[in-house]
Image: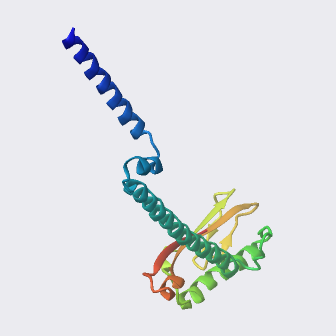
Amino acid sequence: ILHQQQRQDEGEEEEEALRRKLKYFFMSPCDKYHAKGRKPFKLGLQLLKILIVTVQLVMFGLSNQMVVTFKEENTATFKHLFLKDYQDNAPQAVHTQDELNSHINYTLERVRLHVIHHGNILFDSADLFIWFVSSVLGSAADRSGSLRLCDGGRLINVTMDFQLKAINVQTILNNEIPDCYTFAIT
């Protein structure tokens, strides 16, 4: 009987010790500090991690905002630079063959003359492609870039594709490595 009583007391002590461990495990860091007097280093470490991740996210967001702003500003500039009589939020259309030739020649002239001279934009003339999509297969473009339509031919779409390479000068001003971008202009 004495032996059985001793086993029962040991079982109750183990149960009580397990309860205390579980209670301590689920305590808040402040309660643990009051219970044992140990400073909550893990809480401090977690707060430091949160601070570091937050700073990284803010820096990443600011960097991406600068990239988006740079691309949006350059896209608007390219529209004004390469499209004849371009106006913001206005539809772009040509209705006669002379207007079409004028618009194509204007874009080609702007690409050849102006883009090459801008300090932060590089143009490679080998990247220039002109695609003509006509309803009649007999349409053709000569070497000067002008378009000739067969009798009754109707032009549906003209697409000019070329690439420009640009350097974001703002990053140089901030003593950072410059960012280089390739713009696919259509």
Q: Quadrant of residue 99?
A: bottom right
Reply above or below: 109 against 66: below
What x and y, as percent, mark residue 8?
Answer: 28, 16
Q: Give the quarter of the figure containing the C terminus.
A: bottom right
In terms of image quadrants, where is residue 62? bottom right
Figure check: 8 above or below 133 = above
Q: Residue at x 47, y 51 (%)?
A: 30
Residue 43 image position (x, y, % from top left) = 43, 55
Q: Quadrant of the N terminus?
A: top left
Q: Residue at x 54, y 68 (%)?
A: 64
In the image, 108 versus 38, the foreground residue is 38
Determine whether, in the image, residue 174 is placed left or right of residue 3.
right
Residue 91 rendering spot, x and y as whole percentages: 79, 67
Q: Nearer the viewer, residue 154 or 138?
A: 154
The color scheme shown is rainbow
Residue 175 drawn at (x, y percent): 45, 86
